[in-house]
Amino acid sequence: MNKKIYERPVLRKVVEGIPNKFGSVKRLQPIETIDNVPIDGIIEKYGSPVFVISEKTMRETYRTAHRAFSTRYPKVQFAWSYKTNYLDAVCRIFHQEGAWAEVVSGFEYEKAIDNGTPGNKIIFNGPDKSDADLIRAINNKSLVHIDHFDELYTIIGLVDKLKERPQVAIRVNMDTGIIPQWDRFGFNYENGEAWNAINRLLSNGKIDLIGLHIHIGTYITMSKAYATAVEKLAALANKTYDRFQTSIGYIDVGGGFASQNTLQGAYMLATDTTPSFDDYAHSITTAMTAVNFPNNETPMLILETGRALIDDAGWLAGTVLANKRLADGRRSMVIDAGVNLMFTAFWYDHEIYPVHESSFQSEPTTIYGPLCMNIDVIRKNIDFPMLNKGDHFVVKRVGAYTMTQWMQFITYRPNIVLIDEKGEVHLVRKAEDKEVFRRQELVPEYLQNK
Ligand SMILES: *Cc1c(COP(=O)(O)O)cnc(C)c1O
């Protein structure tokens, strides 16, 4: 007998059929419009598939998040995490709302500058900063968050050639109760590395330590972990003051708030379980006010929230390509958007809806993307009504880590449109076409057809 293949056990809440302890039969309601703009019309004009961003949702979400913190703590600053979605239109909307930029590469840094962000409102994170990146950032008075000793030594080596005194923070990693513990970025707290870094930095005398930074992970549903982080950073701030009489201007608690997308294997829907901005704000600001900072000063609180600010504002609309039965009789549906556009489908159970009422019957269905690749699965198992070839669907909450982490694989990347607050639709990123590839590729002389 062959050994059976191991399958990870998953608890799944029953949502279909006879009433269960969570209520009665649930039918998927179609979603015909986004901000009152008909989805059919968007697809007709901009093609299928197409990403749609709601400016209204973005601004509302930002204001809710900002209010949650600013009503509890006097000095609050958000910095938009570029890698979560660095479309210029998206970044500019958050900048208009007052967010600084948080970037993790020279490329993102250039985007932030092009989006009009003043140098001293750009936070430069990440392990990859070239000497040229560092020189530019420091001369622009940007806030450089040091990730490792080699970066610290590079800055020390450059310091005499710079126009400005470096304004730096160090990134710290630590045990906050979150598993897995992210220890690959920054300097460890518990083993003394962070303290060691502060000592080397401040004994140099030519570098200003203006903040302490941490980013404990992503999709953190335990808001208490942030309070632990604040307590440990405060201890570091006090130790720094006692030894160097330097006070820390800001505590940056990074990002990581969960969005309302449900993780695969979760029993409850994320919409029922994800902490609210108020929950996170309560934990973080309670800790910020409970700990004592040197001289009774109140450092600025910086947040680099990405996912939770943009996920809800992004949609992906598209078209059904085919229906088919699998070998075991299960129904499957092929749609024109796959993991090339929704990398996130590897860990989320993305919510997908028909655009129009089609059938009152739903059936367990596997939804595949269009790629000729076995891994291209958008939903392994979803109770879904029967749609026909050519019918439209829409995926909710795809604003975060889709339009940046997408792949040009097998097919072109599609248009992205923005619905403004008046309901007007703007193209904000053009679909790729073969010219894009002609521009990038070079054919050696001997392979050219003459
Ligand atoms: C990715 C990242 C963020 C944003 O994280 P989210 O989980 O999207 O909130 C913030 N800060 C740093 C340093 C990051 O790398």
Image: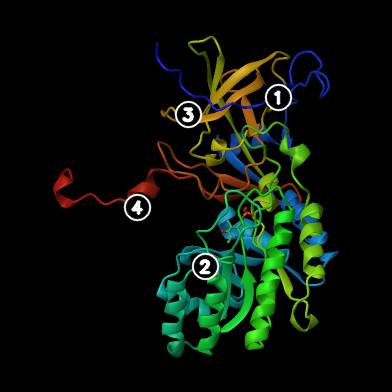
Residue that label 1 marks: 356
Q: Is residue 157 visible?
A: yes
Q: Is residue 63 visible?
A: no
Q: Where is residue 308 shown, x and y percent of the image? A: 69, 50
Q: Is mark 3 within 8 Å of ligand 1?
A: no
Would you call the spot at circle 3 few (<14 residues within 10 Å), some (14-19), or many (20 or more)? Answer: many
> Pointer 4 and pointer 2: residues touching (CB < 8 Å)?
no
Q: Nearer the viewer, mark 2 or mark 1?
A: 2
Residue at x 54% of width, y 36% of height: 346
Between marks 2 and 3, how big is the CA–CA gap?
34 Å
Residue type, mark 1 in image: His
Left or right: where does residue 126 sit relative to residue 232? left
| Quadrant of image for the C terminus | top left
Residue type, mark 3 in image: Pro
Residue that label 4 marks: 439
Q: Tell which circle, 2 or 3, labels the residue nearer the N-terminal end.
A: 2
Residue at x 57% of width, y 75% of height: 195
Residue that label 3 marks: 370
Q: Tell which circle, 1 or 4, labels the residue nearer the N-terminal end.
A: 1
Q: Tell which circle, 1 or 3, labels the residue nearer the N-terminal end.
A: 1
